[in-house]
Every structure is written in structure tokens, then in C-alpha cells.
């Protein structure tokens, strides 16, 4: 070994670097929680940030390299973070992630990662049973996008006649997936990845609350058939991305049963509700799904990227990829412990450990408390918004996502959109809050996802006060 490798792998150096690093990360958390002046996000333009990294002194030490990372982070642990659907991880889960990273036991087959493999099974059984499955099976994979694709590939294998994996589609067949425009774009993408094109997406109309409209499904089904498309699957959302709305899953399940469709539930965001008591009813119909996807990095408190793909009939998870990579897998049987047979990935991270650590250290109670408190708080915020003159919400929140906007009387539709776009930009520039915006039926809304466990009423009140103040400064024409 050269000197540099000896140094880089030195256990003592790991100790020397690691201890102060943990202290620094703990200080990061403290400042997020308590420092009133700390912005949520202070990153400027990409080209400015780029200079920090290209101009770093040649003799920069570890902390010199890490300080700008911490400084320009989007601080998810800050109670004024209410942006995207990514959770501020519980610190213990980050420690678990570090252990996984150092061991680097990727787990395509059992021997590559024995502990990770069996821990993953424990996690899958636990969550599968919470979904109401009697003999669940499935796996962890790298994100909801990959999870949705894998589930739809399983749907294809089971609902398209013949063996698609081996032989492709039967001649002349044009399969399609029934899905609403409010579903996450990864569904649309998965359909196109499968080669079914835009025509493979059978649009389902939604009602004014952004839920799939049960009364118009039959019509969508017939229209697709008339155009030569064979519907093979239907996707329900357990928490749409824009508004956090739950479809009527029990109804969708019955429709699927009557029409011989695979029923997939995209619960990437809100599937976690199976761990709540108060809001468990939103998951009614989960037990009837053929497949369900749930992200752990959204409402289940762990660092990205970990997603459960769960199958009601566990055996179906084995037939998605009939192809054998025979240097890895014994073609004679398909043991549960060789994960690559069932996942899109070959090597994948040891994903289950951080979840297991949380669950065994804090019990399921930690998830319940988190979900219930965030869903409760979002309902409270919605109430605060509608009580304020000039403010409105897009729809009553069903989860922890709220779309709202300032629409003082006298402003036209376009002016109102511009006003809210300006407000959102001002929040970002000043780093006072991190929230995003979304367009629904031509109307622009401020969108918050209440991910931080410590966001409470004072933060919400500040958002509304600040926005009203800024709107007042601005030369807006009032009718
Ligand atoms: C976030 C999300 C996805 C995508 O999941 P990733 O883990 O980001 O790949 C899919 N569906 C829904 C409903 C989501 O909210």
C-alpha cells in the first residue's frame, strides 16, 4: 500500500475526524432549532455557489470543505422549512446510514449483505401487515419513482396475456394504465419507459377536491377501449403530490376487481398513514391493492432514498423480472434473500437498518406521533388561512400538504398569480421560510408541506404577516 492509502484507511484518523464532526452536526441541529436569525436557505445563484467550490484553497482541511456545505444547505431541520416532501431525518437514522455506508454491504445476493437482507425482510413484513396484507412480500428500493416502475412492471407481467418479459407484447396489443392528472409524474414516466407511449396513459378526471371522480371512471374505461387501448392497471394516489389528496381507494379497488385491472396504490407520500390511528381511515382500501409504494424519506423520518414496494400476494413479486443473471442467481429457485431477482437495482444500499434502529429505539409511536401531529397542524394552518381576510386555500387538506394564497379583493386572476409568485420568490430570497409554489387549473398557489416536527402556529402566523406586509409594499393595482 502506498502511504496515502495507509493514511486514508487509518482507524485512528477516522476517530480523530469523526468525533468533532459529530459535534459539529449536533451544533447544526441546535442552530436550526434555536437560532432565530438563521435563514432556512441562503444559497444564491448556482454560479456564485460554484465559485466556492472551485476557489477553495488547496490546503483546505476537512472542516473548510464541510462548512460551506452546512452553510448553504437547505435546512430541513429548521422549523421554517415547509417546502418539498423530504423529511428532516431523525439523527439516529443518520447514524444508521453512516454504519451502512462504511460497511457498504450492497445486497444483490444474501452473501453480499446478510444483516441488511434479513433486516429488510423484517421491515417489509411489518409494513406489509400494517397495510392489511395477510402474507405480504416485497422489498426496499431506491425511491418512489423506481418503486412505481417496478410495481407497474409486475402489473404488466400479470395482466398482459402471455409472458411479456420473455416475448414482448402480443401482436397488436396496446395496453394502458388508468391514472389521474393529479398523480405523480413518475407514473406517466413509467408507462412511457414500458414503451406504451402517451396513448398508454388513460386519463381519469378528478372532482373539485382533486380526487379521481368515481362517477366518470366507466366512461374513461370505455373511451380507451374504443381507441384500441386495453386498460391493464389503475393507479390510485394515497397523497397526491400537489395537494396531498387521498383518492377513494376502496372504490377504486372495487372498480379494478370488476374490470380485471391491477390496482396499484402510489403511497409514496401518504402511505405512511397506515401507522397512524387517527388518520388510518384514509388508507381504507390498501388491503385490496395488488401493490403499494411507500417512501421512508417522506413521512417515515429517515434519510433519502428508501422506498418499500409491497405486494398483497407476495409471490407476485418474483415474476416481474423473469430474466436470470445466472452468475448471481440460481435459476432453479427464487429465494427471498437474494434481492436482485426482484429489484430494478443490482447492487443496492443497505436500506433497512436505519428504519429498524428507529423502530426498535422509539417504537411505532414515533411514526404515529409524527404523522398525527403534522396532519393536525396542517388542518390548523388551513383554518388560520381561511380566517384571514383575503386569503384562500385550494382545498381542505387531507394530509400535511396545504396550497394557499393571498388573493386580496380587487385583483384579477393574473395579478393574483403574479402576486403569489412574487411572494414565493421573496420568501426564497430572504430565506425567512422555505415553501414552494404550484399551479392548479391555471391558478398559482403557495404550497407548504409541513414536514418539520417543530413547525407550529407562530411560524404560520409569520408567513401570513410577512406576505401581507410585502404585498402592501408592492404597487399592485386594486380595482
Ligand atoms: C415523491 C413522490 C413520488 C416519487 O418518489 P421519489 O422517492 O421522489 O422517487 C411518487 N409518487 C408520489 C405520490 C410522490 O409524492
Image (spheres, rainbow, N blue to C red):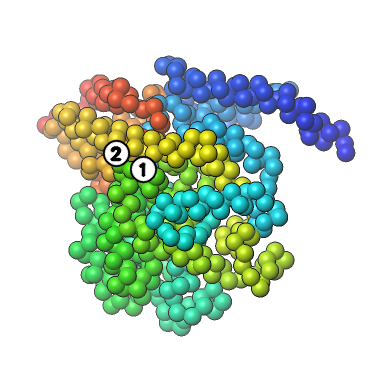
Q: Residues within 10 Å of mark 1 (few under 14, many from 20)?
A: many
* Residue at 17 percent of width and 38 percent of height: 412
Around disc 2, counting alpha carbons within 10 Å, would you say few (fewer than 14), some (14 to 19), or many (20 or more)? Answer: many
Query: In terms of secondary structure, where does tag 2 sit?
Result: strand
User: Of helix, strand and loop, which one carries label 1?
Assistant: loop
Q: CA distance from mark 1 to mark 2?
A: 19 Å
Mark in front: 1 vs 2: 1
Q: Is residue 303 above or below residue 140?
A: above
Q: Quadrant of residue 456?
A: top left
Q: Is mark 1 within 8 Å of ligand 1?
A: no
**Quadrant where the C terminus is found in the figure:** top left
Task: Kindly identify the residue that appears in the image at 48 percent across and 56 percent down.
Answer: 309
For marks 1 and 2 on the same chain, the one whose residue lies earlier in the sequence: 1
**Residue 394: percent from left, percent from top:** 23, 42
Up-down relation of residue 394 to residue 435 (above or below): below
Say left or right for 378 vs 233: left
Can residue 371 be seen? Answer: yes
Nearer-the-camera pick, 244 or 433 = 244
Q: Quadrant of residue 259?
A: bottom left
Residue 407 located left or right of residue 433: left
Q: Which mark is residue 276?
A: 1
Q: Residue furthest bottom?
A: 171
- Residue 368 place in picture, x, y as percent: 39, 39
**In-front residue for pair 152/70:** 152
Residue occupied by mark 2: 402
The answer to whether mark 1 and mark 2 are in CB contact below 8 A is no
Q: Residue 73, percent across and down?
A: 51, 29
Identified at 37% across, 59% down, the residue is 287
Quarter of the rendering containing residue 178? bottom left
- The percent position of residue 110, horizontal first and vertical second, equals 67, 56
Amino acid at each position: 500500500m502506498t502511504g496515502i492509502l495507509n493514511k486514508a484507511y487509518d482507524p485512528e484518523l477516522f476517530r480523530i475526524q469523526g468525533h468533532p464532526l459529530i459535534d459539529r452536526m449536533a451544533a447544526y441541529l441546535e442552530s436550526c432549532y434555536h437560532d432565530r436569525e438563521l435563514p432556512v436557505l441562503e444559497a444564491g445563484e448556482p454560479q456564485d455557489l460554484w465559485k466556492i467550490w472551485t476557489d477553495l484553497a488547496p490546503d483546505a482541511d476537512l472542516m473548510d470543505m464541510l462548512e460551506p456545505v452546512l452553510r448553504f444547505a437547505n435546512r430541513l431541520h429548521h422549523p421554517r422549512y415547509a417546502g418539498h416532501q423530504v423529511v428532516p431525518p431523525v439523527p439516529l437514522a443518520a447514524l444508521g446510514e453512516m454504519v451502512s455506508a462504511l460497511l457498504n454491504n450492497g445486497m444483490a445476493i444474501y452473501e453480499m449483505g446478510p444483516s441488511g437482507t434479513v433486516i429488510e425482510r423484517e421491515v417489509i413484513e411489518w409494513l406489509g401487515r400494517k397495510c392489511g396484507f395477510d402474507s405480504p412480500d416485497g422489498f426496499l428500493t431506491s425511491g418512489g419513482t423506481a418503486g412505481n416502475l417496478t410495481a407497474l412492471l409486475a402489473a404488466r407481467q400479470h395482466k398482459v396475456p402471455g409472458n411479456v418479459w420473455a416475448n414482448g407484447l402480443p401482436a397488436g396489443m396496446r395496453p394502458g394504465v388508468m391514472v389521474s392528472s393529479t398523480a405523480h409524474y413518475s407514473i406517466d414516466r413509467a408507462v412511457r419507459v414500458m414503451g406504451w407511449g402517451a396513448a398508454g396513459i388513460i386519463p381519469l378526471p378528478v372532482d373539485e377536491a382533486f380526487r379521481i371522480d368515481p362517477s366518470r371512471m366507466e366512461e374513461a374505461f370505455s373511451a380507451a377501449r374504443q381507441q384500441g387501448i386495453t386498460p391493464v392497471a389503475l393507479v390510485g394516489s394515497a397523497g397526491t403530490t400537489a395537494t396531498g389528496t387521498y383518492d377513494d381507494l376502496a372504490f377504486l379497488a372495487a372498480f379494478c376487481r370488476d374490470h380485471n385491472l391491477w390496482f396499484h396504490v402510489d403511497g409514496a407520500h401518504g402511505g405512511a398513514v397506515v401507522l397512524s390511528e387517527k388518520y388510518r381511515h384514509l388508507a381504507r382500501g390498501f388491503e385490496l391493492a395488488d401493490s403499494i409504494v411507500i417512501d421512508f424519506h417522506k413521512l417515515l423520518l429517515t434519510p433519502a432514498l428508501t422506498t418499500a414496494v409491497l405486494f398483497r400476494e407476495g409471490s407476485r413479486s418474483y415474476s416481474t423480472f423473469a430474466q436470470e443473471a445466472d452468475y448471481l442467481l440460481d435459476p432453479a429457485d427464487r429465494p427471498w434473500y437474494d434481492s436482485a431477482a426482484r429489484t430494478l437495482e443490482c447492487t443496492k444500499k443497505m436500506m433497512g437498518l436505519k428504519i429498524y434502529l428507529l423502530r426498535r429505539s422509539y417504537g411505532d409511536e414515533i411514526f404515529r406521533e409524527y404523522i398525527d401531529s403534522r396532519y393536525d397542524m396542517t388542518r390548523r394552518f388551513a383554518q388560520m388561512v381561511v380566517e384571514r381576510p383575503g386569503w384562500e386555500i385550494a382545498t381542505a387538506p387531507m394530509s400535511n400538504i396545504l396550497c394557499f394564497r393571498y388573493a386580496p379583493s380587487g385583483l384579477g386572476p393574473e395579478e393574483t398569480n403574479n402576486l403569489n409568485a412574487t411572494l414565493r420568490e421573496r420568501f426564497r430570497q430572504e430565506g425567512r421560510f422555505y415553501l414552494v409554489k404550484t399551479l392548479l387549473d391555471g391558478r398559482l398557489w403557495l404550497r407548504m408541506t409541513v414536514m418539520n416536527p417543530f413547525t407550529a402556529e407562530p411560524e404560520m402566523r409569520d408567513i401570513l404577516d410577512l406576505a401581507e406586509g410585502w404585498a402592501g409594499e408592492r404597487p399592485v393595482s386594486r380595482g
